[in-house]
Each structure stands twice: as structure tokens, then as C-alpha cells.
Image: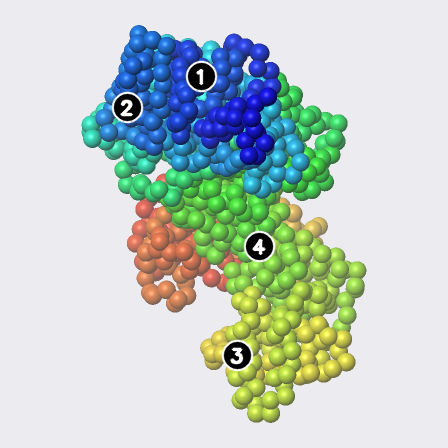
Amino acid sequence: MSSLSGDGQSPEVISRKAQWTSEREDSIYLDSESPDVLAEGFASEATLPVKSGFLEKTPPQGGLPFQKRWVQLDAEYLRYFQNEKDVYSKRMISISSMVSIVPAGPQKFEVATKSRTFVFRAQSESDRNEWLSLLQNMVQKRYSSAGMTPEPSSPALMHGNLELRGVHSKLYVTVNEDKLILYRNVDEYKLGIGITSIQMKLGCVKDADKRAFDLVTPYRVFSFVAESVPLKVTWMKTIEFAICSALSTNTLVNKVWAQESNRFCADCGAAWPEWVSINLSVIICSYCAGQHRRLGPCVSKVRSLRLDQSVWTDDLVQVFLSLGNGRANSFWAANVPPSEALSPFTREEDRKSFIFAKYRQGKYRCYHKLFGQQETLNSALCSNVQTDDILETLSLLFCGADVNCDTGHSDFPSPMSLARSCNQHLQVELLSHNQNTEVPRLEVEYSMDGLEESPALLMYCGNLYKTGSTTRPITEQKPREEFKPRWCILKNGNLSYGSHRSSAPSRQLSMVGVQCLSVDAPGKHGYEHTFEICTESDRLYLFGDDEPDTVREWIRSITKAFLPTSAQDLAETAFRRVGRLRYRAGLMQEICRLGWFSLAGTKLYGRLADGSKEKIELCRLQELSVQQDQNRLLLVDRGRMLSLESERKLDIQGWITDIQQAACRAGDSLTEQQLTSGNIPVIVERCINFIMQFGLTSQGIYRKCGVSSKISAILESFLQDARNTHLKEGEHQVDNVAGVLKRFFRNVKEGIFTSQGAPVWLHTIEIKEQSQRIAQYQTLLNALPPVNKATLRTLISHLYCIQHSSTTNQMNQHNLAIVFGPTLFQTDGTNSTGSRVIEELIQHYVAVFNVSEEQLQKQVDEVDFIIKTNNRPMERKPDPGSEMIFTVFLEEAGQIRELHIKVCATLSAAAMTSEMLEKQRITPQERDYWNSFEVNKTEDTERSLHHLEKVFPLLNSGSTLVIKKDDAMETILTYLASKTNISKYKAMKVREDRNIIPKGFQDRYVTLSGTTIRIYKEAQSTRPEWELPVKSLSLYQGIKKKLNPPTRWGLTVVSKQEKRQWYLCCDSETEMREWMAIFLSIQYDGDVWPANTQ
């Protein structure tokens, strides 16, 4: 029996325990559950061992005999195991971390790193020398680029601390695309000295209790504990993603590597690159691919040779075989200084700046001889795409040629269609991947912040439910039965999905091809939370789930994946829809650019091509018009114009519908209503204008009650869409409209004085001194929100005008105050304080609101004019059956004949023209456009009548009716047929008939688009001097001679409602007719001339 030590343990036990403890200090002891199972085919590394065998190794603290270990050497690591049957190593030393390998006595050698030296002993000198030679050669190759700091073999998807259950130790863990590596701490991670690596293709992740999860392999279950529950979820999803990556194939890789130059990264020269930029036509390593992704998909569209199988068509493979990195770099890297060139071991910051300079700035490219000559570049591109020279096409595209330029061929309008017509499939492939690519520009500044991108956002996976894709809008509810479960993986710019987790993905969506993502209202479909993805191919994909957090995270991850770096902040808005659109901004509507937009609530956010940011309050738009045939949406906000368009009908229809709904959406407060340019709710302005025009002299206006049901109907119409609700005489009664205005103010949230401000307004009446009360009212007025302030001023101004006519309408200041006091302060009327405040505001309107004498006189004149107009005897409208004999003139071949015709109330201009030609036996010839004209000899003007315009109202206008050939109509129709954008913009000489402008014609910038003509002081102005709705105007050809117009091609624009005229001078007859064409097309919604007639 052996003797015992003082603690009751034998010396043998103590010795074995010391050895075991020493081993534990050297490594986390990783026993396999089945030690007898050989790891054939499942080696701990993907690369095959260069050499393996038994070596003896000293413990880290020394003092004990050498320990026998099974050692393996591969291209990246020197590993040692407990025995030859173990799958997981006790330690692994990266080749890149080794500083020196030298002999250390008989049969021994040392492997030195920066922090530690490992001593090994072979069984013979020859064996030792063989190990020495192999290790020294591998280190020598690794450090062939002197001075370069080595990095791990592939970038980590995630890294951080995890506790490994069973050993109660916190380890530093990294997850790569094909393996998980354990380190003792972050310092050893940086040095490249690890414990072991776990092949992801053998693993499976399982959830455990609280912060724990298991990584299950055929040989062992690794039980990890994260620092928090959210971190556990992130770790699990990252590992699941790595497992999917590890199961990819090599077929495509070998095919592309068949071209010799493709075996080395186009940027740093690293061997065997597995990533590509499909639009830049270069093959790159994983490190460089990470920097390419940071440039954004508008610059570089990164794809994997292993994972992204669906994107690889035969033609795309041929592009990379035809060009290869060698030829591609003859363009991209033609001027790289040796001092700036990358190597595989270049630091990350240097790699980042080099790739930015190479592709975003185009700093090293071979400049095309036509660089800077836009039209010539475009012409050269159109010629070259008909050949097989794709390198020349690459050069032209990235030196500024427009990928969508006009080819001059009506049948093949774009370079891509031209290439397709010539069967140049590789050209088509190259062009298709560069439809939205930004051209490199040296003036783009390098920004470290602008290039940051979180790797966690580049991958996501989990279950979703999906319906079949469609090419039509999804308007009806999709029941749960139509949704199928799909295992979805978002990785490296692709969303792939399959029937279940273990199967290979059956479909894939490229994030570069995503046009927009829209979020459905909860409960719209069978699954509670759903979202739609619209792609470049104009297809809709519907995904959903019942868990809001799941869907929210998918939406966020997908949005981050397809938005460029410059627009990443759009993903943080609570958007209804987000994506890319073509836009035309400001006055220069001829230029179309690519922008990124998100619709959140009633706001439209934009990130434009020049880097500027836009925020448009849709409820404040002055104009929102749609041109369906051109897939365009025009938004006008206080003089600013933004036109949105898309070539994809499904995409733009979704934007139009959502923006219209958002613009119509009225909230509960004043600021949430649809507003005019003056910050006044549309409902308030239209009710006031109607009452001023038709109810100013109505006895008891505002005091009399209207019909409650009709008031409710009108109010509801305004709240649904105020901008498209119009009040018409005869259709709406004055008292009902007055009731709408009162009910709106009584119900509006917070009231016009606001809930906090109202008590202060009411207490002001207690101030005895009148001047102090007025000063207090002014202070309180300025403290109101802008919309409340503008609305109160407008309303009190209106009530002041009403009381000005109190002798007729019986509504003096006191009577109006009795009505509006309880209404505006939203009280029950038992207290008269509110009425006293309103009465004082009306009484001291001039002082409280700082109204000038000129403004006051203008209001009084308007009131007097309305009263005078209303007191005129009403003109009897013509009886539809009545007729009048009227004189018209027929002009033919320079001869003028006076004719008489019976004109009834329903006679149209086209009917009168046809009747007179028939009576005179005149047969219109081909390309003859006979028409009726209104000629005003006093003004030296004439205008052609629209074919549906009634003639009867012109009989007493003082003008002459002339029937003659319309010489301008053929030009007008031809011009409109060739016009895709019904708008026109030009600097012109302009004069207005009043003296607001100095005498004479002045330089002005005129725009005609949407439904409005606007006149600006200059092209850079943001607010127009005049803004006129086209449908309320008449356009005459010619200008009064006594005004001395600077050219003889003039137009007179007449607003009969405002009794004003504007004179516009054109530079030529053709230009004048183009303006006429656009004006008539807008005024008559494209129906300029009757179809199939001349």
C-alpha cells in the first residue's frame, strides 16, 4: 500500500494531478464523446495536412517530462492533439504568428511567437530536420512581403466572449464563414494562437435555457453561455449563417479559376479569391469583398462564387473568363503607383482607402480618349455594344458614357436593346449589371465614417411565410392557406429561401435588384404582419409572419442590405415604403437622376444624387398630380417641384397610391391637416372663400344652422381629402358650409388656441388697460404654433370682413363673437369670457395683427366689390333650346367671307366648323386642320377654340369668330407625339398688365408642368412670383402691339377670374408653338384634337 501525503493523496495521484493541471493551463481540455471514431473526411481543418506525426512537447511551465502529442501541420496552422484519434486540437498556432523556427538541441526545435515559445522533440534527428524545413519554408512564404503584418485567413462574421460550460472558462470565440475558432483570450486571438476550430458543415445550433445554446457536432456538444439574451440570439443566427456558407459548392469556383489571372485577387493579389464584383468585372478575396460592400451596391455589386449560384448565368461566367482580372485591371489599375499597391497582408485601413480610390474615385483607371465628351462617349458606346469588345464597353461606361443614352434607333432605343438585337450576349450581361452604377468621380471625398458597415446587418436567417410572386398589385387579402413556410437566408446582398432549413435554397432575390420594400397594415393578409418586395423585373414578393418582432427585424435587415451607404438612415424611419426612384428636381426638369426615398407617415424623405437630403410634408403640398401614361408623380411644395418616376409600372403605382393616401391623411390637430402655401388648413381656406363669395350678404350667416347630415357629409369629405374637395354654388348651401367651418374648429384637437394657451387667452380679458390687453394678445399670438397663428389671423380677418357688411347680414362683432367664442375655445357657452376675447380680437384686428392701411383698404375694397357684384341683376342663362343668328367669318386662300349661322347653347366649335365648311362645299384635304378662332382685334390676339368648347358664351364677348386653317396644329400634334415629358421650362421676356413689374418686358424663368404655370424671378428662385392653374386660364397667340414686345412670337395668358394678363415672348415660331402644345395638352388632359379627324 502506497504512503499518503498530508492531505490523504498518494504521490502517484499528486503527480498525475499536477500533470493534468498543467495541461489544463495550456489548453481547454476538449474530449470527444467518441474518442475511437476516426476523423477521416472530417478533419478539423478544410485544408489537408502537409505533415503529421507524434512529437513530444514541453508543458508551458516546464519542470515535467515531455508530453507525447499528435501534431499536424497544414497551410495555416500547426496543431497538436491529445492523441491521433482526437478531432479537436488542444492548441493551434497560426503560421502567420510564428517569428522563428530554430533547432534547440538534440532532436528538438523551437517555434517562437511574439508572446511564447513552444519546444518540440522528434523521435530522430532526420524527423526533426524535416519538421524544421517544412515550417521554415512555410513561414518564409508567409512573410514574402517584408514588413507586412499577417492577418487571419478569412474575416470573422462575429467575435467576442462566450463561456464554455463544463470548464467554467470564458473564451474568446470567432465565427468565420466555414468554421468557429476558440481562443483563450482576445490577446491570443490577435496573435493567432488558438485552442481549436470547429468545422461549420458538421454543426447544428440548438437553443438552451436562458443565455445558453449548444453547438452540436458528431463528436461533441459544445455548450456556450452568452453575456445576454440578445447576444445569444445574435450568436446563434451568425453560426446558422456560417453553417449555410460551409455547405456551398466548388463547381463554379473551379470554372472561373480556369482563367489564370482569376486565381489572384484583382485588388491585393491574394490567391484563390472566391468573391466577385459583377458590375466592375473583377474577382476579389474575402477581405477586399468586405471593403467593396462598404462602397454600396451603386458602386460595387458583390457576389460569391460559392454561395450565389442563381446569379451566375452562362453569359456572366463568360464575361469573367473573357475579361479576367488581367484585362479588367488593364483598365482599373493602369496607373497604380508601387507605393500604393496592396498585398494580401496590407492593413485594413490601407485596403479600405485603396479600394475607395480605385473604384469610387477611379483614381487609377485608364482614361478613355473620349473622356469628358459626353455625346461622343454615348455614340461610341452605341457603336461598341454591337461588337464583342466588352473591355472597351467597360472603359466607356466607367469613363462617363450613359448606359441608358438614346441610340437614335426607334426600335432599339437603349444600348442594351441594341446589343441584344446584334446577339451580343456578353455586352447585354455587362450592361444589365450597370444600369444603376455610379460613375467614378475624383471629386468624391474619402470618408471613413461613410464607409462603415456592420457585418451583422449583412446576414440574417430564419423562418418566414411566403406567397407566390406576382406581376400585379396585391389588392385582395391573401389567406393563410396561400402562404408557404420558407427558410430564408439574407447573406452578402442576396435573399435566398427554400422549403426547409436543411435543403438547398430554391430561389434567390438579389438585393441590388430590389426597387422598393413596402410594409402592409397589420391584419391586411392571413398572417398578421406582412411586407412586399418589388424588384427590377417588376414582380412582387409577399412575406409574412404573426410575430411582429420577427417581421420587423427582417424588414430592417433587408432594407439595410439594399440601401446604399448614403441612404442608410432611411431605414431608421418608421416607413411605409422605401426604395429607389428616378426624380427630376427643381426647375431643371429635363435632367433625370436616381434617388432613394422613404415614405413615413405624411412625410416623404429623399436622399438625392448630389448628396442633399429632402423632407417633404405631403399634407402641405400645393399640387399632387399623376401622369399615369408616363408613370410620373409631380409634387409641388411652396414653389419646389419634385417629379418622381419609374420604368417599372408596378413600382410607381405603389408609390403613387401610398403617397396619395399619405397626402390625404388628416390628423386631429391643425398642423396635421392638408395645408395651403400660407400654412392654413385647406378646409378653412375653402370654406372662408366660399362664404366670402356667396354668403357675405346672407342674413344671419354663421348664426343660422344648416342641415346636420349635409354638414357631416361635407366635413367628412374634407377630412378624407381636403385638396380634392371643392365647394360649388348651387351644389352646396352657404349655411351648411358655415356649419362645416364651425364644427371643424369645435372638434379640432387642442383647439386653435391650444389646450395650454387657451386659459391664458381667457385670463387676458381681465387686464383693465386696453393697450396692455392688446400687447398681451400680440404676445400670445406670437407664441402660437405657426399653423395656429396663420389660421387665427385668417379667421379673424374673415370675421372682420363679415362684420363690415353687418347692415346687410345682421352679424356685427358682438353677434359673431357669441357664435365663435364657445366654438374656438371649445366650451359649452355658459361662460361669456371666450366670446369677449373673440369680440376684442375682431374689434382690435388692425392693432393685434399689425395690419397696414394698405392691407386693410384692400380687404375693404374686396368686400365692396363682392357686394356690388352680388347686387347686380343675374344674367339669364341661355335656354338650351334657344337660338341666335350670329355672324362668323370664313378665311380661305386669303379671301374672307362673311357668313351667318344659327347658334344654339349646345353648339361646339367643331360642330360649327364642320357645318360652315359643308355649307360652303369645302372638303378638307389631307393634313388640313380647319378650326374656329376667337379673334380680339383690340388686343391683337387670337386663339383656336377647343373642339368641344361651346360657341354661345362668346357671342357677347366683343371678339370675332373666324373659321380658317390652323397652321400650328400639325406642328403641335407632332411635337406632343414625340414628347415623353409634358412640361416646358425656359428663360423668357415677361410682362404683366399691372404695374407690379416695372414697365417693359423683364427677364423671368417660366415653368409649365403638372397643372400649373409658374413664373420665377430667376432660375435659382425657390418661390414663384406667380403661380397659375392652367385650367383657369386662356392662351392667346399674339401680344398687344402698343406694348412693343421684343419679339414677334408672343403669347398672352389671360385669367378672366382675376381679370389679369401676362405676356410671354418666345425666340421663334417653333418655340411658341411648343409652349402652346404643352399648355393645351395640360388644359385638356391630352385631348388637343379630335381623334381620326382633321
The image quadrant that residue 717 belongs to is bottom right
Q: Percent position (x, y) of residue 303?
A: 45, 24
Q: Is residue 1007 in sight in this rendering?
A: yes
Which residue is at a point 46% across and 38% down the rendered structure image? 454
* Residue closest to the eye, 790 or 709: 790
The amino acid type found where label 2 is placed reads: Ser
Q: Nearer the viewer, residue 548 or 952?
A: 548
Q: Earlier in the sequence, mark 3 or mark 2?
A: 2
Residue type for callout 3: Thr
Please report the residue visible at 64 percent of the width from the left and 31 percent of the height from the top.
207
Q: Which quadrant is home to the N terminus?
A: top right
Q: Give the CA distance from mark 4 to mark 1.
A: 76 Å
Q: Is residue 127 above or below residue 20?
A: above
Give the residue at mark 4: 619
Give whichever of discs 2 and 1 has the lower sequence position: 1
Residue 707 position by quadrant: bottom right
Give the x, y percent position of residue 841. Answer: 60, 80
Residue at position x 32%, y 46% in the image: 1067
* Sequence-first disc among 1 and 3: 1
Q: Of 1031 and 345, which appears nearest the observer?
A: 345
Residue behind mark 3: 779
C-alpha distance separating marks 2 and 4: 72 Å
**Distance from Cα at disc 3 to Cα at disc 4:** 28 Å
Q: Does 1010 appear above or below 177?
A: below
